[in-house]
Image: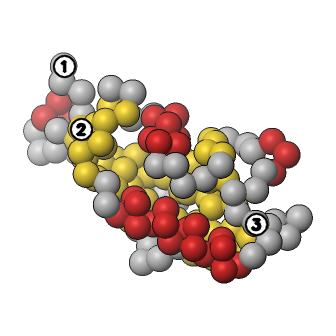
């Protein structure tokens, strides 16, 4: 089963940010990408015949691009991540295979700045991964 830590590790391999984290980012470092479990409700899906026949899983995640005090540079970083996610096909990380990443927004969403004036953007996605063989 794909875990949030697997997705964090995969995002780190892309080399798009100085820091890639999950959970809380200590000291709010700039040029960072956060990987979070999605807070949106998604319907449960299973194969006809039950979970044993399901060949893939879905992990819903939110990517937070916490960049710097430049809205232009923050948007550029978010668009780079968006394009990289869009291009993912058959990538293996920590013995888990990401089949593809389905983006759930048409573009990164501007969520303004944090308390320190650092611009942030969010990308919502569904990570489609290969189910483990039993």
Residue 42, percent from left and from top? 42, 57
**Quarter of the image with the N terminus in it:** top left
Q: Is 99 on the left-hand or right-hand side of 69?
A: left
Q: Is 20 on the left-hand or right-hand side of 58?
A: right
Mark number for residue 68?
A: 3
Q: How far apart are marks 1 and 2 (CA)?
A: 12 Å
- Name the residue rendered at 73%, 43% in the picture: 24
Q: Is 89 on the left-hand or right-hand side of 28?
A: left
Q: In this view, does 34 lie above or below 81?
A: above
Q: Which of marks 3 and 2 is nearer the N terminus?
A: 3
**Quarter of the image with the C terminus in it:** top left
Q: Can residue 113 be seen in this view?
A: no
Circle nearer the viewer, 1 or 2: 2
Residue 40, percent from left and from top? 52, 59
Q: Is 105 on the left-hand or right-hand side of 12?
A: left
Q: Distance between the residues labelled 3 and 2?
A: 35 Å
The answer to whether mark 3 and mark 2 are in CB contact below 8 A is no
Q: What element carries label 3?
A: loop
Q: In which quarter of the image is residue 69?
A: bottom right
Local packing at callout 2 (Cα closer than 10 Å; few below 14, some 14-19, many 20+) is many
- Name the residue rendered at 67%, 53% in the picture: 32
Q: In this view, does 54 lie above or below 40?
A: above
- Name the residue rendered at 85%, 70% in the picture: 117
The answer to whether mark 1 and mark 2 are in CB contact below 8 A is no
Label 2, on which residue? 130
Q: In which quarter of the image is residue 70?
A: bottom right
Which residue lies most toward the right here? 116
Label 1, on which residue? 134
Circle nearer the viewer, 1 or 3: 3
Local packing at callout 1 (Cα closer than 10 Å; few below 14, some 14-19, many 20+) is few
């Amino acid at each position: 089963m794909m875990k949030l830590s697997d997705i964090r590790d995969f995002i780190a391999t892309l080399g798009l940010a100085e820091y890639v984290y999950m959970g809380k980012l200590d000291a709010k470092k700039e040029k960072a990408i956060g990987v979070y479990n999605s807070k949106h409700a998604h319907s449960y899906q299973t194969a006809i015949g039950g979970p044993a026949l399901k060949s893939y899983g879905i992990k819903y995640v939110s990517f937070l691009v916490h960049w710097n005090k430049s809205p232009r540079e923050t948007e550029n970083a978010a668009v780079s991540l968006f394009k990289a996610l869009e291009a993912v096909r058959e990538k293996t990380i920590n013995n888990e295979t990401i089949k593809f990443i389905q983006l759930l927004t048409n573009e990164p969403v501007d969520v303004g700045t944090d308390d320190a004036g650092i611009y942030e953007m969010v990308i919502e996605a569904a990570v489609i991964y290969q189910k483990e063989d039993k």
